[in-house]
Image (cartoon, grey):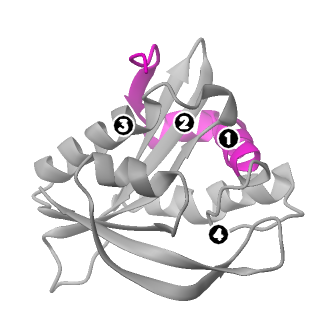
Amino acid sequence: MTAPTVAIARMTVDDFEKHIDDFATVLHACVHAGANVNFVLPFNLEESAAFWVGKVAPALKNGKRVLWAAIENGRIAGTVQLDYDTPPNQPHRAEVTKLLVHPDFRRRGIAKALMRELESEALRLGRSLITLDTRTGDKAEPLYASIGYRTAGIIPDFCVDPIENRLHPTTIMYKAL
């Protein structure tokens, strides 16, 4: 595997708003490639953009979520978010959400580069525990394990397959920083 040739950029609210269509394109392509990230087919670009506008933008604006983009030649190749809007009894924890790499850019180390940035920021924010969930058996599961995430457990029949009408388990993972 070669090192990524992309730049990893932390997105400001203004940066994000300029690139909503690009983020929508990445999510749309990932779902159509079978990524189980909360959406099912049929799934169009308008629905993808609505997710970014309705869910991500407010979280960025309230200052409790950080968003990164992996950018190559002006194109967003991947993205990840750190959600640290936790309850008062969990000020030490944050959650990984929507680690996405466009199918055209996979197997180049982009996901690992995005996760390194996310973990560094979590530490800067005083977060010592990172949690996430991923479809059990998905390609992301061994990726997370390879960078130090441990399995806490598996929940059966957690989510619907994005393409087929069947249920999948999810694996809950964590990493102490």
In this rendered view, identify the residue nearer to me: 12 or 6.
Answer: 6
Residue at which label 2 appears? 78
Q: Residue 152: give x, y in percent of width and height.
A: 28, 77
Q: Residue 174: give x, y in percent of width and height.
A: 26, 67
Q: Quadrant of the C terminus?
A: bottom left
Of pointers 2 and 4, the one earlier in the residue sequence: 4
- Residue lying at 72% horizontally and 67% vertically, measured from the top left: 39
Of pointers 1 and 4, the one earlier in the residue sequence: 1
**Eye-nearest disc, 4 or 3:** 3
Q: Is disc 2 in contact with disc 1, using a CB cutoff of under 8 Å?
A: yes
Position of 62 compared to 149: left or right?
right
Q: Is disc 1 in contact with disc 4, using a CB cutoff of under 8 Å?
A: no
Residue at which label 1 appears? 26
**Eye-nearest disc, 2 or 3:** 3
In this rendered view, identify the residue nearer to me: 48 or 2.
Answer: 2
Tell me the kind of residue under disc 1.
Val
Label 3 sits on a secondary structure element that is helix
Q: CA distance from mark 2 to mark 1?
A: 7 Å
The numbered dot on residue 38 is 4
Label 2 sits on a secondary structure element that is strand
Position of 5 compared to 160: left or right?
left
Position of 76 compared to 81: left or right?
right
Q: Quadrant of the N terminus?
A: top left
Of pointers 2 and 1, the one earlier in the residue sequence: 1
Label 1 sits on a secondary structure element that is helix
**Res. 109 visible in picture:** yes
Tell me the kind of residue under disc 4.
Asn
Residue 126 is inside the magenta segment: no
Residue at which label 3 appears? 112
- Mark 1 neighbour density, 10 Å: few (under 14) some (14–19) many (20 or more): many
Q: Which residues are magenta?
A: 1-30
